[in-house]
Image (spheres, rainbow, N blue to C red):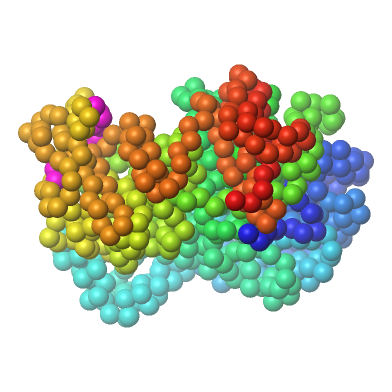
Amino acid sequence: MEKKILFPQVGGFLHGGDYNPEQWLDRPDILEEDVRLMKKAGVNSATLGVFSWSVLEPAEGEFHFEWLEAIIDRLYQNGIYTVLSTPSGARPAWLDAAYPEAMRVDRTGMRAHHGGRHNHCMSSPIYREKVARIDRKLAERFGSHPGVIMYHISNEFSGECFCPHCVKKFRGYLADKYDNDIEKLNAAWWTAFWSHRYNSFEQIEPPFTNGETSVMGLNLEWKRFTTWNTNDFMKAEIEVLRSVTPDIPTTANLMRLFGGLDYRKMAPDMDVVSWDNYPTFHNDWETLADTMSETAFQHAVMRSLKRGKPFMMMESAPGLVNWQPVNKLKRPGVHRLACLQAVACGSDSVQYFQWRKGRGSYEQFHGAVVDHIGTDDTRVFREVAEVGELLRKIAPAAGTTVKPRAALLFDWDNRWAIDDAKAFSQASKKYEETCIDIWKAFFRLGADMDVVGSDEDLSDYNVVAAPMLYMLQPGTAENLKRFVERGGQLFATYCTGYVDKEQLCFLGGFPGDGLKSLFGIVSEEIDSLYPSDRNGIVLEDGSCWEVRDYAEILRVQDAQVLGTYADDFYKGTAALTCKECGKGRAYYAAARTAAEQMEPLFEKMLTDAGIPARKLPEGVECHVRSGESGNYAFYLNSTPEQVSVSGVTGRELVTDVNVEGVLTLPAYGVAVVHSGCN
């Protein structure tokens, strides 16, 4: 397998983060000290310019790049590379004063005042013009600098705008989608209901708070449009940069499983996927191991946006953050653990927000490598330096990738449709939570999973889980059939195949679009349960899985019944089924049960697919990166106790010792074991 190293200039992993020297231009002693401290911490990159517009262009048309050039020069002379950001994530006051249309209009129709960030109108022609101008000047000034290795586009895209520009653009988007035929839209949106049909596209408004919010098709298309428009804005920035410097890669920092944008639609237009990783460490509702495994899921989401290529962890907190309900300190050793988890899951970078704490404003108490004390003898600085040294030791793993043989299907469209559906129980839909819990159950069995769209190629996988696939995209049913027929093991649940891409219900019983024949069942009704309701699924071996929230009543066609309901008027009817199709099997769970209860079924699926299940000690996770130089197995211990893992053989890179059979991990310990290619 060929390596796909992101930054050959660095020769390994990127280590650094957001650096804001513009806040310290009056303190040249601090700027000089920053370079010394970066080198001591093993930092080889700095992200510059993220929120620098008001210093780069303090008045319209007045550009000051000399300070930035001096910083980039100094960093490069000391072996530190620059990730150069476009400054469009926050506007200077002069721009809003001169061009108020750049400020967003909210869902009530009220225009925003100047302030905050991520609140510009993506459609505003004048804002796009001003962004393009400064982007071009930055590229022309710094694009040929040998220290600049990447462009960082804007910052944490989010939000929506309801201004006249966006309304007009939305109407054009709809007209293009529905071939300028308003009756096609009326049919797709079922607007005859409540007499809400339109006579022209000019009558359509986005879902204002005091406007039309009852048409599911409108609500969904507005979310799709917001992604499309945000991506169009991002592409416009990228096009300007590429017109000057076509060889410098681009990225945009994403935010976990963010609900406002469909990242799967944006990823193809950036060269590298990056994201900002801020788990709620040491909370009072789960163990550290639970927090870590959910974070592994988020890494898998990002990894899967560009399969077969490393991603980047663009931001993480070297210490605490300042915006969580309780801003808890990371316990000793947890920083190293979290950083190595990112790398284990496929990141070729460990980056932080922020390098040095600012003295004032909103993020003055957000964690940083260098605290207000300004010294290199703090616990956080020492732990960051330890990570820098560790990344140097495992540098040969850079460019390798994680290649799971199992996948979980997750669609943003499906998420939006489920959330908006006036059905089921409004308080317990929990689509994301259900997906994460099932992913974690497979992970506990030693199976790393990608997180992919329902219309993506599944030929790399032998096991696929498709929880609550309520909305079927065109071609999804055939995609799943092909997967099973060639020998795949498929697991699906209640709420599968209820609506098409327009949110129109399938007729003839659920799941629709031909999936009834794949699973051999028809879902006739679905019962929503109160928290006090109890039921169960009785299996062939006499065990019982507890049922909560949802229970479908099935009509079995030609599937094998593996479990039946324990109670209620549908007692004894099918609740868990399996149908053989071609060389594979399609399992259907008609009720919600804890993913942990289903692990024996998942283990059977893995075994039948030729993926050996591996149960590690509790709190230990393992991820494997592979490349032309072999396999790199990352072991992470999320517990405060020493643990031993058996069946491990190879050269451990952190300690530089051979492991023959048993690997011992100290509390919160990490290990990277290199072995030959499979």
Position of the N terminus, as image quadrant, is bottom right
> Residue 241 versus residue 290: which sits nearer the camera?
290
Q: Is residue 211 visible?
A: no
Main secondary structure type of the part rendered in magenta: strand
Number of on-image labels: 0
Is 365 on the left or on the right of 564, as rendered? Answer: right
Is 370 on the left or on the right of 202, as rendered? Answer: right
> Residue 552 versus residue 370: which sits nearer the camera?
552
Let me know if residue 552 is in the magenta part.
Answer: yes
Let me know if residue 34 is in the magenta part.
Answer: no
Q: Residue at x 23, y 71 (%)?
A: 186
Q: Position of residue 18 (x, y in %)?
A: 72, 47
Is 44 on the left or on the right of 669, as rendered? Answer: right
Q: Residue at x 63, y 28 (%)?
A: 662
Q: Residue at x 37, y 31 (%)?
A: 596
Q: Position of residue 221 (x, y in %)?
A: 35, 63
Q: Position of residue 2 (x, y in %)?
A: 66, 61
Residue 83: quadrant of the picture: bottom right
Is 202 on the left or on the right of 53, as rendered? Answer: left
Q: Residue at x 28, y 60 (%)?
A: 582
Identify the magenta region: 543-554
Q: Is residue 181 visible?
A: yes
> Residue 293 versus residue 149: which sits nearer the camera?
293
Name the outermost residue toward the left.
569
Name the outermost residue toward the front.
660
Q: Position of residue 614 (x, y in %)?
A: 48, 35
> Residue 213 versus residue 569: which sits nearer the camera?
569
In this view, 114 is above or below 297: below
